[in-house]
Image (cartoon, grey):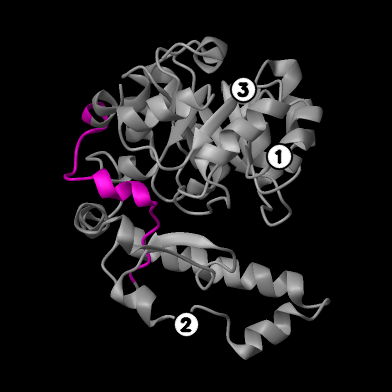
Amino acid sequence: MKTSLSEMLGVEHSIIMAPMFLVTNVEMMIGALDNGITAAIPALNFRTDDDMRSALNEIKAHTSKPFGVNLIVNKSNIKLKKQLQTCLDLEVAFIITSLGNPEEIINKCKPKGIKVFCDVVDLNYAKKVEASGADAVIAVNSEAGGHSGNLAQSELIPKLNSELNIPVISAGGISCKGDIDKAFELGAQGVSVGTIFIASDEAGVSEDYKNALVDYSANDIIMTSHISGTPLTVINTPYVKSLKSNNGWIKRKLLNNKKLKKITKLIIMSKGMNSLKKAATKPTYKTVWVAGPSIENITKINSVTDIIKSLT
């Protein structure tokens, strides 16, 4: 699995354990780094900056292997400035940017030698981040868990490869070594793997969430905008089935109001994130579990070590 990504980061395998909101933790990160892959953790998984610094220092004390942090770079993330400064101070190996213009992040990371990988879903945005100096793009395809893209991997990877001069990392639909081989055959220089790691011993989510990944199949994955205000792939649990697929007329009216649109979106997202957090960590009838169709190949809860062995 030696590619331009593995050479860039100095890792054995060109695999990133994807940064998963509410899921990725220090134990999972260490498990990944100890087994020849790299990993990233969402800055939003930490309640305070002190919590974030403590966690990153714990990982650095355990290993010198490279790891990254995922930053939400749009205006909804009021903690961005402090989160970025922590990444700069502790000199993480790379940053993954999502949902916004990464130019400022790139400009501040370059002098420190910190690589910046940007989530993209199409060629237009990929060209923009390349022009801004991104070191690689993470091509989020239609099989990704959570906020997925619109294009299939088979279309997205070749399209980006034909136009870009930086590495393309494929994200979505990876659950076994065969999936990785397929991504590499399409021209990917690495893969980002998320959903299958939720069903790990080290993941801090509830056992109900983990068992759902085993019990449900790809046919049970649906996309809904009702949770966070933007399309989100989740397991179609009885609670999700009870939700209306479209926003109610009051929400639609508020979203169509120019003055109220932004604050309405923030309220919807905040409520949705709270709902996801409760469902991920403790028993609740509001079972909203994020996952991608790669749950099809999850047959039991494994250690991070064993999951990585199945990929390599």
Q: Do the CB atoms of the residues marked 3 and 1 lie less than 8 Å apart?
A: no
Q: Earlier in the sequence, mark 3 or mark 2?
A: 3
Count neighbours of disc 2 (C-alpha within 10 A) and say few if under 14, some if 14 to 19, many if 20 or more. few
Q: Which one is in front, 55 or 252?
A: 252
Please, what is the three-letter code of the amino acid marked with disc 1?
Leu
Mark closest to the chain's N terminus, 3 or 1: 1
The residue carrying pointer 3 sits among few (fewer than 14), some (14 to 19) or many (20 or more) residues within 10 Å by Cα, namely many
Which residue in the structure is indicated by mark 3? 167
Labels 1, 2: front one: 1
SS type, badge 3: loop
In the rendered image, the vertical position of residue 10 relative to residue 80, given as above or below? above
Which is more N-terminal, label 2 or label 1?
1
Q: Amino acid at mark 3?
A: Pro
Q: Is residue 198 visible?
A: yes
Q: Position of residue 147 (x, y in %)?
A: 53, 54
In what element is the residue under mark 1? helix
Number of numbered discs overlaid on the protein picture: 3
Magenta span: helix, strand or loop, mainly? loop
Q: CA distance from mark 1 to mark 2?
A: 33 Å
Q: Position of residue 257 (x, y in %)?
A: 79, 81
Please state if 7 lies on the left or on the right of 174 as rendered: right
Q: CA distance from mark 3 to mark 2?
A: 40 Å
177, 107: nearer the viewer: 177
- The x, y position of residue 268, in whole percent, is 59, 72
Q: To which quarter of the image does residue 249 belong?
A: bottom right
Question: What segment is highlighted magenta in the picture?
Answer: 287-306
The residue where tag 2 is placed is: 244
- Number of the label disc, if any, that sits on residue 17: none
Quadrant occupied by the N terminus? top left
Residue picked out by circle 1: 123
Mark nearest the camera among 3 and 1 is 1
